[in-house]
Amino acid sequence: MAPAALAQQDTALYHLQGVEIFGKPAEVFAAGSRVSTLDSSYLQTYTSRSLAEALQARTPIYFKTYGASGISSASFRGTSAGHTAVLWNGLNITLPSLGQSDFATLPLSSVGEVAMQHGAAGATYGSGAIGGAILLNSPTYGRQGFRGDLQQEVGSFGRYFSNAAASYSNEKLAVGISGNWQLAPNRFPYRDYATFGAPERKQEHAEVQQHGFAQDLVWHLSPKSKLSLHSWYTSTDREVQPALGAAYTNAQQLDKNLRLMAGYDYSSRWGQTSIKTAWFSDYLKYTDDNNYSVTDIQTYQVQAEQTYTYGKRWSLRGGVNLQHFTGDVEGYGGGVTEDRAAAFALFRFDPTEALELSLNMRQAFIKNYNPAPTPTVGANWKLASGQNHHLYLKGNVSGSYRVPTLNERFWQPGGNSNLKPEQGWNYESGLRHVYTLGSLLVESEATAYYMLVDNWVQWVPTPEGFWTPHNLQKVRSQGLELSSQASRQLGDLKLTATAGYTYTSTEQVKAYEGTEELDRQLAYVPLHKATFFTDAAFRTWSLSGNLSYNGLRYTNGNNTNFLPSFTLVGFALNKQFLLGQQKLIASARVDNATNTDYKTMQNLPMPGRQYALSLRFIIP
Amino acid sequence: MKKYITVRRFFVAAALLTGSLSFSSCENDNEGPSGEYAQDAVLVSNEGNFNSSNASVSYLNRSNGSVTNEIFKKANPEMVLGDVLQSMAVHGDRAFMVMNNSRKVVVANANTFKAEGEISGLEMPRYFVALNDSKGYVTEWVTFSGNGRVAVVDLKTLTVTKIIEVGINPERLLLAGGKLYVANREDNKLSVINTATDVLETTIPVTHGPNGLALDNNNNLWVTSSGLKVYDPVTWEISTETSAPGTLSKINTSSNTVVDTANFSSRSASPGNLTTSKDKTRLYFTYNGKTYQQDPQVRQLSRTPFIGRSFNALGVDPATNYLYAARSTGYTSDGWVIRFNPSGAAVDSFRVGIAPNGFVFR
């Protein structure tokens, strides 16, 4: 390659990664807020699991899981399932019908990176980012040449998981494709306390069959431009596990989610231009002896943004996002369409090396609703800096909003067309401390937050037997997030340990009617959650351990009934064998190692101790 | 033992003859039953949320006003009562809890609430009544839209011995004069079963939707019917134009014919929760957001509300003549029981379980 071309490419690289000089992409415009990531070695070890299991094990987010096969929804900083936005390659993939994501249908095997934005981020991520946002990115293919990856896993209670991936990349092109298949009959033993004599039974109605594929293509058209194509398909077919004592009525749910997106990035003297266009097809079929319900929704999305970065001082991004939904939903009595638009401006400014500022603003436009503008003001300030220590003070104020979902408005019966949009304010402040001594690195963070959400939407069952959403006038969530991570390299041994604790108090503080449920912890939000996990690598061996503690969760609005706290422990051991150029990785895993009998929803037993053995073959 | 049963049978027969419907078994027992929930007991059934199996039973001590919730769970710590407690009845020393979505009736000792067994294999069971110590009846919907049935249960073995097909969505049951009256909730008739032969003897045509049965002091059977309601397919609201008004009908239990029917004025509202005072000279029911007291001797429907609110369930305590009213606060928080004195003034209230729907006075 001619030196000139090389130089040009370097420039292109500099331009394309322009904003990344401020840190990880997710953090650029999030100065003053907390952004965390899931460790990549963890993602490698737990490929066969879902995003729900990964986040439950390693983050402060609490997951409500409806039995072994059921849907799994997030409670981030005490908020409800619709308050966590999920973005894939920068675009919101939350189901427009439900307004929430089922994290059990998001397999880790199709995801390259997982980042969490804690707290409201309406300005950056739009509707639904009230408690936080989960940012998923497709895998990147750094290495040049061909790579193949085959994995087979067998586990307890009849589980099989297979994954195959192939990728190729050179200077111009990177392509990758992967497919996965999983069968989890979940035939775990449990004691049926709802039958006289409490007989021991095997779960018979919690089978999950999941398969899918993901494909990525990144093509550098020129040194200044690239085209990318990503697709992601998952099909999840499951039996809906009945509660102890509740009749099984052949309840089945089939989810088919196809996501396609194309992106074009171009660098010029005006900065980076990024255009993304996407088509999502979300199909959900629920059937039982008395119901047959199909929700089929198409989402068309375009996002165009321009980012200008000036040296290391500031970066400005402006953009628009357009969404068009068209749904053919029996539950709505036919077709529904909706258009949404949003304009945003994100500004990052570092006046000195010690101070980083963010000022973001977003305005959404939706027919029949008038969402208020959502700003974010945030700052990171390096308070003190010593030879081994760095101490940062950070804080932000951010707005958030959520427009009622299609189901909340149109579902028959129960849909409530008078529902008001949710509007939230999040205030937080914290300290971050980084300590280094030789190869020892200790990063600690403490964040306190206070959040108010007006017109919080809650679904309640009616005496007629259907559910209907209504607004809670004002909900306050406040809490504390503590985490500390230490890592150290000792010769061939690399050790990492992370401890986290979260206190979450979420209460309705103002009610439109009645005062009976005021100032009580909302149901299914644990006051306490703690995690502790370690990763150790020694030559060809690696070991990981995960412990999570989830405090008691009330099951009713007046806090007289609760599900007891539980602790889950898991381990994974990997050994890598070199076979010429090829690698073979053998893994043994145990989940719920202490065989804890726990429930995240009333009377829905969860599996006890589970083993899994896996072989993974990597070329080259 | 045999003598005991004979005495008991005599007592039950006597109770039926005098029209007593309270399944009070031990009024003339000198020692009285022992158990935490035996004395001065008012038991409240709490339906719980569908598919969560969080139904419960509350105990209210009527003399000192203390409340104990979750008494089944307290007596059987690891056990789960089941899903959707539709109704509860007590006969002798046994409580029968009809678990609609668990497809069974859970049987517990009524004084201690220790589980004693279950009647399983029922399809959408709704209400239970015991004829005597050895025989009981359970209504079963079986389906939402077709004919339901009455299961005849051997209370010694807790097994179904016979099924009798009745009308659509059979619910409330009432025993009178050797007959079992069955109200078919989505039909326009009562089914009458001879309790000696367990054969369907006759049907009594009534207004569509019989949802309550009560016997007055003259042995007249009173029936509240909702009227045929038409639902808007979109909102599921009851149409105010095409729905038919509800009625209160009087049935002569000798001839099993309707002798009088009074029409309510609203097409959309339904009367419900029919019950009687201690001496059976007053009827109580809910209608259109209010609670009414009706003199069975008066042909005109009462227009003055007894209480300006409606409730999820009503019950009159035969010991005090207090009216007990259940208020549901939805299915995600616990409901309330409010007590009213015989003149309709609220006395006190208690928080019970999720969606309280019935009372048993012992």
Image: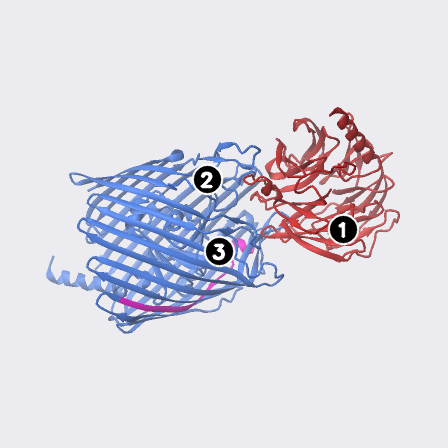
Count of marks, rendered view: 3
Chain of the residue that carries numbered disc 3 in the rendered image: A
Badge 1 marks a residue whose secondary structure is strand
B155 left or right of A240? right
Of A192 and B189, the residue lying toward us: A192
Chain in blue colour: A
Residue B127, percent from left and from top: 69, 38
Residue B226, percent from left and from top: 75, 46
Badge 3 marks a residue whose secondary structure is loop
Q: Which residue is mark 2?
A: A238
Q: Can you tell which mark lies on residue B323?
A: 1
Above or below: residue B318 compared with residue A430 = above
Q: Which residue is mark 3?
A: A80
Whether labels 1 and 2 belong to a single chain: the reply is no
B91 left or right of A554? right
Whether labels 1 and 3 belong to a single chain: the reply is no
Badge 2 marks a residue whose secondary structure is strand
- Residue type at numbered disc 2: Arg
Residue B207, percent from left and from top: 78, 42
Rendered-image quadrant of the C terminus of chain A: top left
The majority secondary structure of the magenta stretch comes to strand
Residue at horizontal 35 percent and vertical 60 percent from the top: A35
Q: Is residue B294 magenta?
A: no
